[in-house]
Amino acid sequence: MDPSEDPASSFLRSIERRTAFLENVISTCPEGIIANDTRGNIFLYNKSAERIFGYPAEEVIGKLHAKHLYPPGGAEEVREYIYSPQYGPHGGLVDFETEILRKDGKKVPIRLCCSVLRENGKEIGYIGFFTDISARIALQAKFLESEERFRGVFESARDAIVSVGEDGKVVMANRAAHELLAYGENTLPGTDATRLFAARFADYWKELSVYASGMGPGNERRNIEILLLSKSGTEIPVQLTLAEKIIRGQRILTAILRDITDRKALEEELRLQSITDTLTELYNRRHFLSLAQNEAVRALRNQVPFSVLLMDVDRFKQYNDAFGHEEGDKVLRALGKEIRKNFRTMDTGFRHGGEEFLVLLPETTAETAILPAERLRERFAAIPFLPHPDEEPRKVTLSIGIAEFRPGISIDDLVRSADQAMYAAKNAGRNRTVSYEHLVARTDE
């Protein structure tokens, strides 16, 4: 160490030489992490500290003295206890509860673990890990209220609340829990808690129970998504918050269960929107690439074939130019409908782009794929399109290329092969199906 170098700068430089993994841990740690030198100058302040204290890092590092993060006298109290054996080894604090002072002037209860930083045997500063325990303090305060008041809050809560005893049976459940799980009034107490979860989550609940026992009274495990099981057997997605409490010597686990059915439905709707072509109601090209890649992995693992159809609406540009985009869209929607109707449930249709469409056919050789391809082509060609009601119906046809997946090729290669076959169909007069495998065989001849 350079004697002229400031100890804090030296320590900071040593941190910067750590791996990217350590930097990521500090950045994403849910606890606020703050380090300062012996003069109180702060040189480390992570994202969670910004959330807890309300100061952005640029207003703290090198600018704000550590004592300003505490109410008057708070910093001195922490420093005093660091060297006391009451809350941990000499030179450290473990689970010390105190208050900090946010930027907005609000006092926030926290749990602090703190240690002296040393370099070459010399104290150069302190590092602290801050956990906001406001929620825990609030929960403790509620339990200290009168039974009548607590029962009022408990029963009027919109979220379902279920308390479970050491024997794994429900001790208390509020009205919202009975309604959510479709149990009769006050019939949940005495029920085995594992019966409230889908079978595949029963063991997970037990693991959570064990985990909670190691967190200490009042601690919480937040935002776990899990499936409940109603009395009728319906699965209900919920967000679970788990807290442990020792009441009269008995360990009680309290689960707060928020019904997220609507949120999950919205997420699924948004997911479908992101992978679906709105005009044809088929999946889009991005989803094709994902499913086709999965199918390639399955095909190689299980040694089963799969094929794709790539089709193009013949002379679509001329039709679109002659009759307008609205009539052109009717043709594309009709093709999407025919694709959904004319294939197996295991097959999937996609709009590849413009007037090009794809169909993914699992467990199907190119030879076998000819039959459904021809069926689709013939049925689509039989649809009478009426861009002008007073004129004769118009016939619209398809050129279809087929390609079978082969080990060693990519999905892009597979689509290119189907594309070559499709253009061979067009060059041969349109309104027909051509297999890439047949093209290669003819070329080899």
Image (cartoon, rainbow, N blue to C red):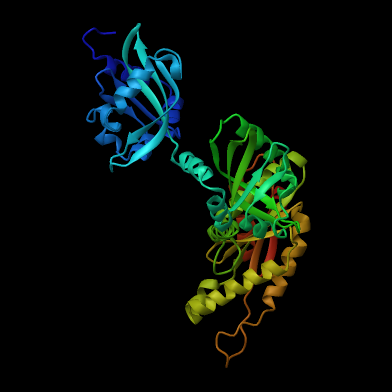
Residue nearer the viewer, 118 or 275: 118
The quarter of the rendered structure image containing the N terminus is: top left
Q: Is residue 137 left or right of residue 47?
A: right
Residue 210 rendering spot, x and y as whole percentages? 66, 32
Residue 170 rendering spot, x and y as whole percentages? 70, 46
Residue sitting at x 41%, y 17%: 92
Quadrant of the image occupied by residue 62: top left
Residue nearer the viewer, 171 or 428: 171
Residue 143 rendering spot, x and y as whole percentages? 53, 43
Is residue 166 in view from this perspective? yes
How many dots with numbers? 0
Is residue 309 in view from this perspective? no
Q: Is residue 301 above or below residue 129?
A: below
Q: Is residue 373 above or below residue 13?
A: below
Residue sitting at x 53%, y 79%: 327
Residue sitting at x 68%, y 67%: 340
Q: Is residue 301 above or below residue 156?
A: above
Quadrant of the image occupied by residue 108: top left
Residue nearer the viewer, 355 or 174: 174
Residue sitting at x 71%, y 74%: 379
Q: Is residue 378 above or below residue 434?
A: below
Q: Is residue 124 left or right of residue 370?
A: left
Residue 403 rendering spot, x and y as whole percentages? 68, 53
